[in-house]
Image: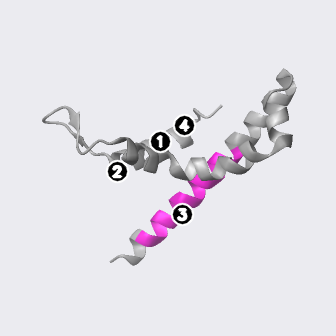
Amino acid sequence: MLTGPAFTAHEERRLHLIIPFDREKQDYVDYSTLRLFAAVYPEDVTLAPLIASSYWRRLADGSETEQARFFAEVATRVSSAAAAAGTRAARSSSTAV
């Protein structure tokens, strides 16, 4: 499902950039729901076509085999989006010198 190591690590890095954790106070700095939404926004955009599609919704609500196909597609799209975001981040950090 969506708990693969690459997805979790990428999302966690993004969360810590947007909502930093203060180790001294043992609390998040400037936490807000909007910042949390911003952290998961790329995945939301990636999954929107699946959720909007009657074909994919039918699979999501179907048999175990159909659901497995749906979740495999979700994992593929989210992994691809995370990889693309990582490539963009690496490119921008190397040109920001």
Residue 46 in percent (x, y) is at 64, 52
Name the image quarter holding the N terminus: top right
Residue type pointed to by label 3 = Thr
Q: Position of residue 93 (x, y in %)?
A: 40, 69
Residue situated in front as seen by the camera: 61 or 69: 61
Q: Is residue 43 above or below residue 25?
A: below
Inspect the magenta stretch and tell me whether residue 87 lies in it.
Answer: yes
Label ID, residue 87: 3
Residue 28 numbered mark, or none = none
Q: Secondary structure at mark 2?
A: helix
Q: Is residue 42 left or right of residue 66?
A: left
Q: Amino acid at mark 4?
A: Pro
Provide the residue designation for mark 4. 5
Q: Is residue 25 magenta?
A: no
Residue that carries the numbered disc 2 in the rendered image? 18
Q: From the viewer's perspective, is the residue at label 2 or at label 1 nearer?
A: 2
